[in-house]
Amino acid sequence: MWPIPDILLDINFFQITSSYIFRLILEGLLIGIIYSLMALGLTLIFSVLNIVSFAHGEFYMIGGYVVYVLLTRFKGMPGLVGIVVAALVTFLIGAVFERLFLQPMAKGKVDRPSEYAILVTFGLSFFLQFVLLGIMGPFPKKAPRFWSFPPIDLGVIRTTKATLFLGNIPLSGGRIFAAIIALLALGAMLWFMFRTWTGWALQAVSQDRNAAAVVGINPLTMNTLAFALGAMLAGLAGAVLVTVFSWVPWVGVPASAKSFVIIVLGGMGSIPGSLVGGLILGVVESLGTGLFPDPARAQAYRDVFGLIIFALVLWLKPTGLFGREL
Amino acid sequence: MKRWMLIVTVLAIASLALVACPQPTPQVIEKTVVVTKEVEKVVTKEVEKVVTQVVTKEVEKIITQEIVKTVEVTPEKGRCAPETFAELDKMEKPVIKIGVPVPLSAPGSVTGGQAMQIAANIAVNHINENGGIMGKYPIDVVFYDTSGLPERGRAGAEYLITEECVAAIAGEYHSAAGVQEKEIAHKYGVLAIFAETWNDKITAAQYPEVFRIAPASSMVAQADAKFFSDLGVSWVAIVAENTDYGVPASEATKERLADLGIESEIYLAEQGTQDFSALVSRVLQDVQQREGKKGVLTLITGETSYNFEQQAVEGGLAPAEDLIFVANQVAANHTEFWANVPDGNYMTFRRVGVVPALTKDNPVAQRFIEDYKKATKDPDRFPESYAFEQYDALMLVAYAIEKAGSLKTADLIAALEALDSRENGYQGAQGVYYFKYGVSRPVPEGEPEWMWHQWPDPAILFLQYWSDGQPVDEACVIWPEHYQTCGTDYVVPGTEPPVKP
């Protein structure tokens, strides 16, 4: 039996305990990691293609549904297999869409490319929502959890099927698993971006398309890769969260809105910005909801707390926390 | 490009902020008022004789009289439904159209909307199987997806009445939409029977055209408070949705709890919220600071409630001996509930409307239940309360037309008001419908205003699951006492009930 550290005990100040604050921060970080994964995909698409994908939330939704279908149709299938398949499916859909609908824009075959990009990604968003509504129906689905905790009681750490208790702080097992997978995916993505030739090529295209082309990088191929990778990251976020939230065809709409906030908060096109922005948003939302004086309004204002930070950053540093100076 | 993106982002943020703000719903209430009118002024001259002198005094006496004046609103033009059968006979296809507004997309409860759609189609089949109303006028229902939003409810009612030419409206799940629909029904003088909208305002406005067969929020609040009181709960966390249903329902429940000496706190969340982790932490913190038995009451509708309930258990707010957790009524749909709230064992839930045991002697209910199971292709699915209500709402409209022998709203209202007691009532699937108060029998002083055209007898029961994945038929009825099926008012988590139903 290990002793319980002080921070996990209830040290009461102004009727708010230290363990309560610690719990709120931990919960904010757990969901913030998933936000970061979502936002990283959107950042990648924006930095390379210079467009905002309004269908980002729908890739998140598809990722979740793929895992749900696999785990409910093939009982006993490991959750990780479902997650990998979801990543592949969203990668492929992203690649095909980019080739069919966004490459004409990159090739200069489309008038008013900025407006075209907004319309075509909005169109994809609605199309995917209604196709999935037709296939999966409107009723909420939830994939079986990837694993249940074995019963443990070590004093400071104990578990139930769905919950891990750190001292007296309960943490959802589904969220912990989702955050671990998201961290691994983020690490892999950062390694890919900063340690591989293809990653350098993507960065080069994001900085200067013409210069990249001069040194032998095909910007059109990089466009496809960036969009597909961005879609895959959103799909991964959905794949790990489908055991946490109830899944419906419009589940991606709020997730997409949060990604937009994060990439502007962190700096448009900045990879570190989207990572830090996601964590900030998660923690601020959690602390705001937990500490806002009026309990009746605290949850209803959840989105507002993040937006206040967002507005402050835009006011004090219009390029975002890690954005390139204009 | 960046500028475009910024503009779109700012717009998205602004709309998010707006959604977070509660929006008061303006409404016009027409009702009977009492005015005091000066009807006579009497001036008399009195002569007082005093010993020493004669004084003349002018006395003015104002006689007043109370006059009951009914404020009448002439329906606006625009309604296009035929008002007589002669008009109907002239049509190429003499079909009576009835509008059915239901939520079929987010943020409304699609679960509720779809169940009501299925129930409405069953009602149409039953009404039309012998040729329709009076044996020769089949009915046709026109669905409108309101998404549970006020503006769509308003637009939907307007569309159904002025474009689809419906003779009546029967349906709706969300109060937010229903509160607006009643205004439009009143504006055009079209009969509206609300199936599952609980907001008191729906009938408290006392519009002649508006009837309700769901309970009013205050009726449910009273039952909730009594349930917690009977279980000895001393503090309740009311987690409600920030809508025209959730806000007044939570406030009414708080008041009723206070009447019984129970403290409570309201926590509002937006409809469609996914992540409740911080709210769960907050509620848990408040629960842990209270002594004695505590309760959690979920006044969030539809699929959003599943997210709250599962996250509550994962966050340590699980049902316990000293924590009574009341899930939303959609928990009665056990297949969906267990898929979305796999750790929801020992949760209690309120069931408005009948349970299987109460339908055994009712052939109307039996027929509906059988057809509902066939239509949903789920032999284990007992119809939800809103499915029963939608079926009955349409059957009541058909009954009113048949009984009145007319399509005029005034005649339909009179036909429904003639159902003035249980003995004279209409036998529906859910029970015997009657309306104690209305145009012909105003709500007396001392009775709540929402009793106008309100069915007074909806059954309000509390049930509890006591085994993982349990079908709703096997759940224990734990309240009120005379309906208990397991010999207990609460199955303590980790145990089994003394009597198994």
Image (tube, rainbow, N blue to C red):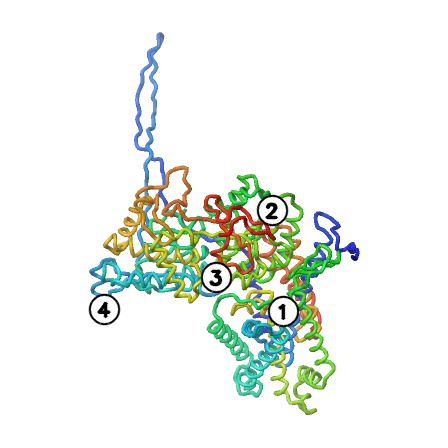
Discs 2 and 4 carry the same chain letter = yes
Q: Nearer the viewer, mark 2 or mark 3?
A: 2
Task: Report in which chain the residue with disc 4 lies.
Answer: B
Asked whether B262 or B28 is in front, the reply is: B262
* x and y, in percent, of residue B172 in the image: 41, 58
Q: CA distance from mark 1 to mark 2?
A: 32 Å
The numbered dot on residue B92 is: 4
Side (left or right) of B460 relative to A28 = left
Asked whether A269 or B82 is in front, the reply is: B82
Sequence-earlier tag: 2 or 3: 3
Q: CA distance from mark 2 to mark 4?
A: 63 Å
Mark 3, residue position: B108
Side (left or right) of B325 relative to A279 = left
Q: Secondary structure at mark 4?
A: loop
Sequence-earlier tag: 4 or 3: 4
Q: Secondary structure at mark 2?
A: strand
Mark 1, residue position: A146
Q: CA distance from mark 1 to mark 4?
A: 60 Å
Say what amino acid the circle numbered 4 marks.
Glu
Sequence-earlier tag: 2 or 4: 4
User: In the picture, which quadrant includes the N terminus of chain B?
Assistant: bottom right
